Image: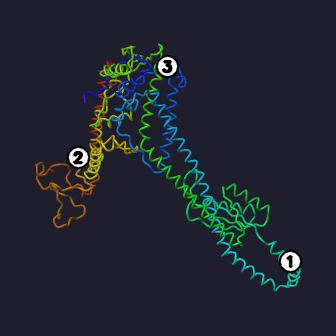
Amino acid sequence: MARWFRSEPMEYISLIVNEDAAHDCLADLGKSGVIQFTDLNPDLTPFQRRYVSFVKRCDELERKLRFFAGECEKFELALEPAGTIDSFLDTPASAGTDDRTGAQLLESMEVELEGYESQLRELNSYSEKLTTEYNEKVELQEVLEKARRFFMTDAPRLAVSELTTGGRDNASPDDRTDNLLEAEGGATARDMDMRFSSITGVVSTEEKARFERMIFRATRGNCYVRFAPIKQPITDPESGYLIEKCVFIVFYKSLSIETKLKKICDAFDAHRYSLPDMDDAPAVDRMLTENAQELVDSRTVLLKNQDTRFRLCQMLSKSTEKWTWLVLREKSIYHSLNQFKSDVSGMLRGEGWVIADCVENVRDAVNKAHANMDMAMPSLVDHVPQPWPTPPTHFMTNKFTYGYQEFVNTYGIPRYREANPALFTAATFPFLFGVMYGDIGHGLFLFTAGLYLIYNEKKNEESRLGEMAQGMHGGRYMIVMMGFFAIYAGCIYNDMFSLGLNVFGSRWEFEGQAENAVEENAVATQIGEYGSSESVYPFGLDPMWHVSTNELLFFNSFKMKLSVIFGIIQMFAGTCLKGCNAIYFGEKLDFSFEF
């Protein structure tokens, strides 16, 4: 804990490495995580850097991996975890048993991922085309069935209604005129003249009301529209979502209206289909049979394509996360190399801050990288003057202290060698939480949840967790301590799910309490003599306070005074830390006027 009180002492070093060994050198240094490089090329834009082409290649690989992850998500395939970070860092930088360099690793990954991407995109485009053809056949089948049902059921009723109206008209004085027209063959011409044209198609159910309203307004009501819903939703070939659609039939009597109707259908993305004459039943049946057979064949091909895509995505889901980690590592290495400066041909010079205790480890890592590549030119790691007076802050944390340090960092990172508030937060925060959340029952739930997270620690580290689950896993020890102090404070308050526990027997009693005949506004009296040990409840508050009428007044007063006391103590401790920092840094004015 003494080491956690102040940040690690830092030293500024200069690092000169061979250009060919620079990649492996930075890969080894990145595993240790004890060095932070400074940019020696501040005047260069990101596109003028030495290794910008490698960074761009890594960005392209990341795009392909995101595409693979998205395709796997469409099939609800979870990406298999690549293990723990420690096991990944233990693998060589070349990510294989051979001696491939960083450039060779990127090249091999580019070739492999390019093949998978082209294959998957080709399957997706083919699937989109097959889905479109399949949807057209499904819609045509529905249109044929719905249209035939309409002409078989509704059309005869309309015909009967017309005959009934015609019978009443025959009784009118114009009977002679009708007979003359029929005698001249005018009845057939009149029937042909009264025959309506129709447009059939499919439109989205969401657009049904707007579609019908637009037809009514555009044709001034001179159309007859019928809708019939399609029971099974249809898959959108572009997005993959299921869309509810319905079949429509529009009857009209004018070429101008036909032009308007076609424009309205195009505006609402309604698919129009040409149907044979519904009076020709054999032709309709033949068309239904042929389309049904084509529908089966199209579905078979579509399912085969979907199965091929699924198997490919299933294979990609096993390696996508591992590839992502490899690309991120390579990108980080080349991003750090972009901060190096090429003063001499074939050599790179970098500068940065390193933990004082790890300078020898850095020197050994650099020498090892050069020795593995049989470099004759030696490397150099040496101390140089600091470029600015304030080094970076670095704290060595473990599983227990990590959560508290991250919690403090959300408010602000302490400056270099300043007293670390996280050390005191590890003790005060769970305790103050327990004072606020004091309840035995609720604290027990929290304590048990923290123990469960600790028990599954290794399992959670090797699995893919969401953002919230990852945060809970990082603060598992904090949750345990918060639950423990909540239970402790609940015992002090004698509160379990807002109920008092009469464990040791109350030291107060009401008159008539034994006979359950306590009068309203009765005053409790102590059992023992005032000031004796028998008049004091052994631990925590007396449970009788939970049934008294002045319970709220007493508990609010008790907790408020307790909060004020602890708050003053905490503020005083912060002031003492301010004085300690002023003494450590030799800031006499701050110590005199701020402390």
Residue 50 position within the rendered picture, expressed as x and y whole percent measured from the top left: 51, 22
Q: How far is mark 3 from mark 1, CA to CA?
A: 96 Å
Dot 1 lies on which element? helix
**N-term-proximal mark, 2 vs 1:** 1
Point out which mark residue 186 bears: 1
Closer to viewer: mark 3 or mark 2: 3
Q: Residues within 10 Å of mark 1 (few under 14, many from 20)?
A: some
Q: Is residue 191 above or below residue 296?
A: below
Determine which quarter of the picture holds residue 83: top left
Camera-side residue of 581 and 200: 200
Dot 2 lies on which element? helix
Residue at horizontal 53%, vertical 43%? Answer: 119
- Residue at the extreme bottom of the image, as rendered: 171
Q: Residues within 10 Å of mark 2 (few under 14, many from 20)?
A: many
Residue 434 position within the rendered picture, expressed as x and y whole percent measured from the top left: 28, 45
Q: Look at label 3 and name its amino acid.
A: Asn
Residue at horizontal 61%, vertical 54%? Answer: 132
Closer to viewer: mark 3 or mark 1: 1
Q: Residues within 10 Å of mark 3 (few under 14, many from 20)?
A: some
Q: Look at label 2 and name its amino acid.
A: Tyr
Residue at horizontal 11%, vertical 49%? Answer: 533
Residue 497 position within the rendered picture, expressed as x and y whole percent measured from the top left: 27, 55
Answer yes or no: is residue 592 visible: no
Q: How far is mark 2 from mark 1, CA to CA?
A: 103 Å
Q: What scheme was used to colour the molecule?
A: rainbow
Identify the residue position indicated by label 3 in the image: 41
Dot 3 lies on which element? loop
Identify the residue position indicated by label 2 in the image: 488
